[in-house]
Image (spheres, helix red, strand yellow):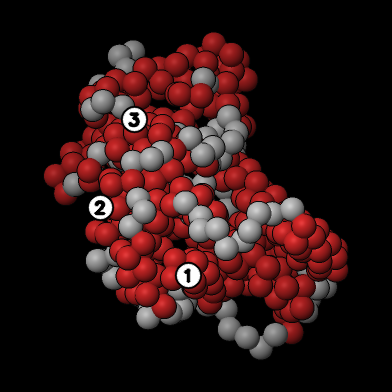
Amino acid sequence: MNPLSESSLELIEKYLLGQLTKEEQTIFDQEAKNPRFQQAIQDQQALMNAFKAHGREEIIKEMNQWDQGSLVQTAWAKSPRTWLYMTVSLAAVISLIWLFYLPNKTTPATPEALFADHFSAFPNIISPTVRDGNSLFQNKDVAFGYYDEKKYAEAYRAFTAMPDSLRDSRIEFYRGIAALGSNQTDTALILFRQINQQPESRFYKEAAWYAALAHVKKGESQQAIEYLTWISENLPHPFEKESRELLKQLQN
Amino acid sequence: MENDYVELIQAIKKGEKGYLKEIYNKYRKPFLEWSAASYQFPEHEAKDIYQQVILIFYENIIEGKIERIRSNIRTYLFGIGKMLIRQEYRKGTRFTQIENETGEIIPEYEEMVEGHRLELTEKEKVMKMAIKSLGDTCRNILTLYYYHRFTTESVMNRLGYKNTDVVKSQKVRCMKSLKKIIETNFDKDLR
């Protein structure tokens, strides 16, 4: 018995995925009178059900992993006393070190030191890296994989390698951070400036903070102060506290 | 969120799992608390129900059954949850508190929940085992196509292939592999 043609099988697939055009629907309706075609529909439907069951298992596995992440936070939240005692102890130790061992605290920090004190990469909330055998990797996932591992040069290259159509302002924000983390400060500044001019962008406000940091790194205090001042005029801001602190240090 | 969540739905449809994860994490605790307070569901059972809720939500999106949500996401998810909980009660394993409710049965939620049920035939179970036997590349490609409803172009972008022709050839090869696994290892089970 001759198997159905590729085009017939494709038609069945499109039918089951709800993707038939009007013309294809007409052809499909005609072919559906054929018992072999009808059998092929049933076989393909069975396969789709099997994929559905498999796909559901994969998603449930991922949701359980998300729960693991949440449980870690909850554990901290459930033990505020422990957290408090640890914080107080740490603060005491740091105070002692500061009083007795640090050099004169009025020595101005270098741009590099100031930058290092304040820079930390914005958490990846766009494309969390799923570390299991069923991960469906894409260019974006590769880039964020490097990003999560703090391999900023590799992350920057991977973000840059993404097609332009996929590089929206959120991706450009992370690309900017990767650039900043890999000493491509001028490139980072261009990206953050652009994003900070797009109020509709998800990271419109955050971009101002990182632009300030980029200027700090370049030793351009005045430009950094301008961005920090903008932040103070556009509250609430996710980096409000850090921005106030940095502004104080730059103005001293 | 703006525009009846149209953007969010489109993003999830394109495979941006980050959004689904945000939603999952955001409503998990409220859902568990609500199901415990309203229906005395222990956490582990409520968690299973919640994951089914998110699955239904996700599948409605990828199958094009919803393009916007006019209420809010919480109302939508909890509506589905309520229907799933009703199902649990109908199974008879729990006392009928829910039947004493004078509350409404919302037909669209009920339809959603009924349509979500999937009981595999023996043949389909065997096919599912064959899918698991595939190599990672083939399993991923075919799952993207047949479960996540990705277009060829989306698969190309997701998996980093050069062009859509390469994806199509790979898909054909993978389907042949799958059919061979079914024929070689499982056909005797299907007769």
C-beta proximity under 8 Å, tags 3 and 1: no
Chain hosting mark 1 = A
Marks 3 and 2, how far apart at CA: 27 Å
Please state the horizontal and vertical placement of residue A54, each as a whole percent of the image: 56, 37
Chain hosting mark 3 = B
Question: Quadrant location of residue A251?
Answer: bottom left
Chain hosting mark 2 = A
Mark 3: give few (<14), some (14-19) or many (20+) Cα within 10 Å: some
Q: Mark 3 falls on what kind of element?
A: loop
Q: Residue at horizontal 45%, vertical 24%? A: B138
For this rendering, which residue is in front, A199 or A42?
A199
Q: Nearer the viewer, mark 1 or mark 2?
A: 1
Q: Write down the residue under mark 2.
A: A190
Q: Mark 2 falls on what kind of element?
A: helix
Q: Residue at horizontal 46%, vertical 30%? A: B140
Question: Quadrant location of residue B47?
Answer: bottom right
- The disc, 1 or 2, on the residue closer to the chain's N-terminal end is 2
Q: Nearer the viewer, mark 3 or mark 1?
A: 1
Q: Write down the residue under mark 3.
A: B160
In the rendered image of this protein, does residue B147 appear above or below residue A93? above
Mark 2: give few (<14), some (14-19) or many (20+) Cα within 10 Å: few
C-beta proximity under 8 Å, tags 1 and 2: no
- Give the amino acid type for the residue marked by disc 1 in the picture: Asn
Per the rendering, the mark at residue A252 is 1
Please state the horizontal and vertical placement of residue A186, each as a whole percent of the image: 28, 47
- Give the amino acid type for the residue marked by disc 3 in the picture: Gly
- Give the amino acid type for the residue marked by disc 2 in the picture: Ile
Please state the horizontal and vertical placement of residue B162, each as a whole percent of the image: 26, 25
